[in-house]
Amino acid sequence: MIGKEILHKFKAKSCFGSSTSEVGRVKSNMSSKQITHGHHLVKGKSHHDMEDYVVAQFKQVEDKELGLFAIFDGHLSHEVPHYLCSHLFDNILNEPDFWTETEKAIKRAYRITDTNILDKAAGLGKGGSTAVTAILVNGQKLVVANVGDSRAVICKNGVAKQLSVDHEPSKERKNIESRGGFVTNLPGDVPRVDGQLAVARAFGDRGLKEHLSSEPDVAMEIIDDDTEFVILESDGVSAVMSNQEAVDCIKDIMDPQEAARHIVEEALSRKSRDDISCIVVRFK
């Protein structure tokens, strides 16, 4: 478990929610790889406040080196993704079963965090947030979890592989209807839960919570010699670029900060109007 002092420092340093970029580099004691990471995010064309927040940081936890990376994409809220920035990794890593039953522990931590958000709805507001989180353990294993449509994509030998799951209402119609909700394309041109939300799983959203899930999909991937980099991205990227297109546009950019910036700029050039966030973690 992480001590309170370490967690306090983590919260203070790792949450980014404005137009910013930063690069981090680490030589893992547990891996022969020089692991680097960078991120970039820009506010979209809408009139609301910036609703994307990111976490990108390495931490020493007992005898483990952890890379902690996340993108939280809010809707009708910047308070909920900011709350996730400060609390979700805290809840995950303080789960007593995290090292032995990782998937079970992450799902429990997501559920607890969602309950806490709903309990604080008076202060956090009625909106919600999607999330994609990635925990890199000793530079050797990557654990990805997500709710909503922010993505994690790994590149091995130039080939993109999506590790997260897009939780689209049309794909989860039966579960939504079993909870008393419905899915419709009206108003607009995309399927929405109760005609409002374009994702089937999210944190918060108190008014829709009876019909939504906050249970994440969890995937684990070994970082081997074929692994080149990992991309975390909000739907401001995936709405206008395929996974392979995102990989191809940065495959020759060794600096992860420049790579993240390039993906964001490419999404903008393709007329993405949403808030856009991207993290790149490079292994070689």
Image (cartoon, rainbow, N blue to C red):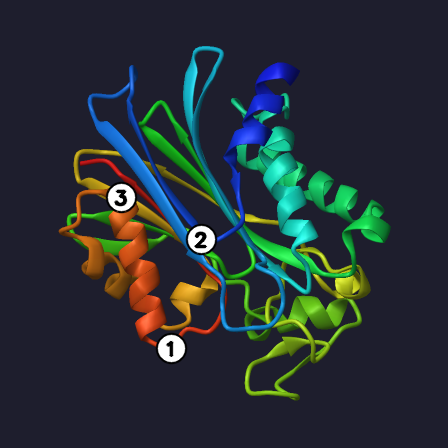
Q: Label 3 belongs to which residue?
A: 256
Q: Depth-wise, is mark 2 or mark 3 nearer the camera?
A: 3
Q: Depth-wise, is mark 2 or mark 1 nearer the camera?
A: 1
Q: CA distance from mark 3 to mark 1?
A: 23 Å
Q: Label 1 belongs to which residue?
A: 271
Q: Residue at x 27, y 58 (%)?
A: 262
| Kind of residue at badge 1 | Lys
| Kind of residue at badge 3 | Pro
Specify few, some or many for label 3: CA neighbours under 10 Å numbering under 14, 14-19, or 20 or more: many
Q: Secondary structure at mark 1?
A: loop
Q: Residue at x 25, y 65 (%)?
A: 245
Residue 61 coordinates in the image, percent (x, y): 49, 16
Q: Is residue 25 visible?
A: yes
Residue 178 coordinates in the image, percent (x, y): 75, 68
Asked if the residue at tag 1 contacts the one at tag 3, i.e. Cβ–Cβ closer than 8 Å, the answer is: no
| Kind of residue at badge 2 | Ser
Quarter of the image where one finds residue 65: top left
Which label sits on residue 164? Answer: 2
Residue 38 coordinates in the image, percent (x, y): 34, 42
Q: Earlier in the sequence, mark 2 or mark 1?
A: 2
Q: CA distance from mark 2 to mark 1?
A: 24 Å
Specify few, some or many for label 2: CA neighbours under 10 Å numbering under 14, 14-19, or 20 or more: many
Q: Residue furthest top?
A: 63
Relative horizontal placement of residue 240, taking residue 85 as reference (left or right): left
Q: Earlier in the sequence, mark 3 or mark 1?
A: 3
Compared to residue 255, the image places residue 188 above or below, namely below
